[in-house]
Structures are given as structure tokens and as C-alpha cells.
Image (tube, grey):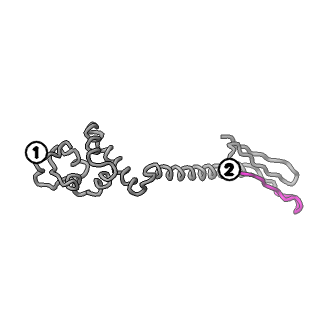
Amino acid sequence: MKGSSGSGKKQTGSSPCAACKLLRRRCDKQCVFAPYFPAHHPHKFINVHKVYDASNVNKMLQKLPVHQRGDAVSSMVYEANVRVQDPVYGCVGAISSLQHQLDGLRAQLALAQTEVATSRCFLAQPLVPPRSHHHRPTFSWTPTHNPNLYLTWTNPSMMMIQCGHAS
């Protein structure tokens, strides 16, 4: 690994980075791991090493421009932590779970929007009070996933009031 040979000077005045400490090697100024796996966060490197192996992480980081390495390390840390928690599905399981939550929230939002549209439509119509007990007004509406919503209200004289909402 680059920066892992014994010929480099040991960092003066500081402890080795988390990667070098775990790998029991000297940490020199050119250590590719030091900026991303500081000594005070050893847990970040432990799972990354378990999942990817230090030599593969070193190769990946060496191939990337310096300005992209931080994002790559963040991604590896996240993916490694999820893979340790769920060895079978890893990130795919997390993404699938979030997708199901998103689908449920979209359905709830669609239902709420339909209810708001129905309420607005119904409240916009003038209501005629019934003339007798025998002819009570009826209200019918069946929620569907159809973007066209129709609300029907029948007053005692059997006049139909329809309100439509088209998306």
C-alpha cells in the first residue's frame, strides 16, 4: 500500500490514523487513509476494512482525484455499516425499505389531496335544506384512484348537483 512502507517517517506529535492503528503499521505524511479515518474515529474504518479490505480501499482512493475522496469514503462507510447490519441485502434492503415508505406516503398524500378537493367542491355548492322528513338529502361519493373526481348531492326535489375535479 502506498504510504504504508516502513521507509516513511512516523507522524510526529500525533497518533497514527485509525486505519494504520488497526493494521498495526506506521502512519506517514503520505498516508492515504489519514485525512478520512482519524485516530479519534476508529469505528469508521473497522467496518470498511471488514467489507472492502484495506488494500482495496487504498486502491480505490489512489485512483480518485483528491477532491472526490471524501465523498467516496463517506459512501464506503455508509455502505459498510449497512452491510454489517444486513449482510444479505445491505444497501438494497435499506433502499427497498425507504421506497416502500415513500410509496405509502405518496398514497396518503393522494388520499389527502382527494379529500381536500372533495371538501372544497362540496362546500362550494349551495345547499338547499330539505322540505320534509321524507325527502332527506343524500350525498354520495366513492373514492377511486381516478384523477377525475365527481361528487353528487341530491336535494329533495331530486336535482343533481355535480362537481368535478380534473387533474
For label 2, the residue is: 120
The residue shown at (34%, 51%) is: 51
Query: Which residue occupies the extreme bottom position in the image?
Result: 133
48 relative position to 86: left or right: left
Q: Quadrant of residue 46?
A: bottom left
For label 1, the residue is: 7
Q: Position of residue 53 (x, y in %)?
A: 29, 49
Image quarter in which the N terminus is found: top left
Magenta region: 129-143
Give the residue type at disc 1.
Ser
> How many residues crowd mark 2 within 10 Å: few (<14), some (14–19), many (20+)?
few
Q: Position of residue 75 (x, y in %)?
A: 35, 47
Is 145 included in the stretch rendered in magenta?
A: no
The residue shown at (80%, 47%) is: 161
Image quarter in which the C terminus is found: top right
Question: Mark 1 near mark 2, Cβ–Cβ under 8 Å?
Answer: no
Give the residue type at disc 2.
Arg
Q: What secondary structure predominates along the stretch shown in magenta?
A: loop
Q: Position of residue 150 (x, y in %)?
A: 74, 46
Q: Residue 102 — which label? A: none
Is 130 included in the stretch rendered in magenta?
A: yes
Frontmost of labels 1 and 2 is 1
Q: Quadrant of residue 56?
A: top left
Label 1, label 2: how far apart the Cα atoms are: 77 Å
State the residue in front, 127 or 87: 87
